[in-house]
Image (cartoon, rainbow, N blue to C red):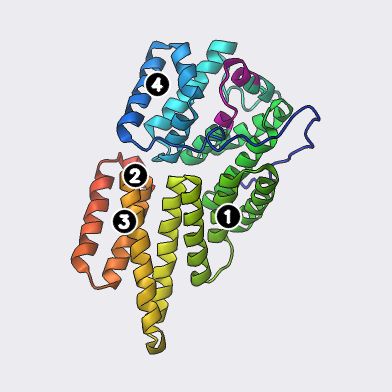
Amino acid sequence: MSHESPLIIREPKDQITHKAPKPTEAGWEVYVHSEEFKTKTEIFREALVREDMDAVIECLRDQKLIHSFTTASRGRHDKNLNLLWDGTELLLRKRFGESYGILANNDREEPLLWGQQLIDVLHETNIPETLLAELSSLAFHKRDGALFFRIQTLVLHGQDSLRFQRLILNRLRHNQASWADTVEKDSTLAAALNKEVIGESKATGQVILETKAALGLTLQKELSPRDRADEARRLATSFDELGNQPDAIRARIEAARYYVELAARQRNNPAMQSESEENYGLALTLIEDALDKAKDINYLNGLLRAFPVAQAIYNSLGQGERAKYMYQKMVTYKRDLPSEIREKF
């Protein structure tokens, strides 16, 4: 089923201010040290087992932890995504009763949980509104259409209560662009949504989101391999400057992919041999940098996407042993994943 209607944003009420929070307040940071992340995750897991609501709420307030969950997602069966979901559902049940939840009575004309109530709970517990965007990302990674559009509907229904209305709705719009592109395979709709995200981001000062949408648009619109590669490379530098390491890695991988494509086209043209070699060199530098950075921050998704690109580059350069090593590393990393998650890569 296609969901083509973009997010509808009404004119905000006068009393709502839209001063953009700092990047850390917007919830884009992730834990880059694996041991710290593991410790925080275990605290969350134990709090859920004990139903220690003070501890659960404290974990849900940790934007860095929650964004780490969605950034490092390994698909619909990811245990950390389940932690985020279970924590949110437990919060709602404790607040409203056992029959309440985000998907409770989703088929009724009047849903049991209204967006107003969901947002009120966040305000009462001092949980940042960015949790709404992360729940939308959770549904995207799980490829759960019912949940994805349910969260969107709830937030739209309660949007007048949002303290950072335009910021949150814009993040949801970006998630919808990702859904359109990845799930519905509608790059035209995805590009249109990302253009809206860029325009709104400029108005609200959401520089990281603007850059993320620009990368999405670069991959969605019709461009030559040269233009696509150059733009992805430029955006990687922008992400570096913003401190957004996961997206910087992703941009480098995409840039390397398109420099390889360009170099392969040029290779058989004697007049372009030198340029072909230069582009292979650029691709190699970018992918090795992406691999190093992904290892540094334990970014598994980045590694699994970088290995096949690196393998292709080394094969093209006649470095068969190195290409074989990249393939073996990819297989090793995949082997440690459950089979249902392995299919994602």
Task: Please give the label number shown on residue 307.
Answer: 3
Looking at the image, residue 314 lies above or below residue 197:
below
Residue found at x 23% / y 48%: 332
For residue 271, side relative to residue 328 (left or right): right
Give the mark nearer the N terminus: 2 vs 4: 4
Q: Which is in the foreground here, disc 4 or disc 1?
A: 1
Residue identifier under label 1: 214
Please give the range of residues in magenta: 120-132
Residue 4 visible to an observer of this rendering: no
Instruction: Tell me residue 8's x, y (percent).
Output: 73, 40
CA separation in Å, label 4 and label 1: 34 Å
Q: Amino acid at mark 2?
A: Leu
Q: Amino acid at mark 3?
A: Phe
Q: Is residue 98 magenta?
A: no
Task: Name the one closer to the observer, 284 or 238.
Answer: 238
Residue identifier under label 4: 44
Q: Are marks 4 and 1 in contact (CB under 8 Å)?
A: no
Q: Amino acid at mark 4?
A: Phe
Secondary structure under the numbered disc 3 in the rendered image = helix
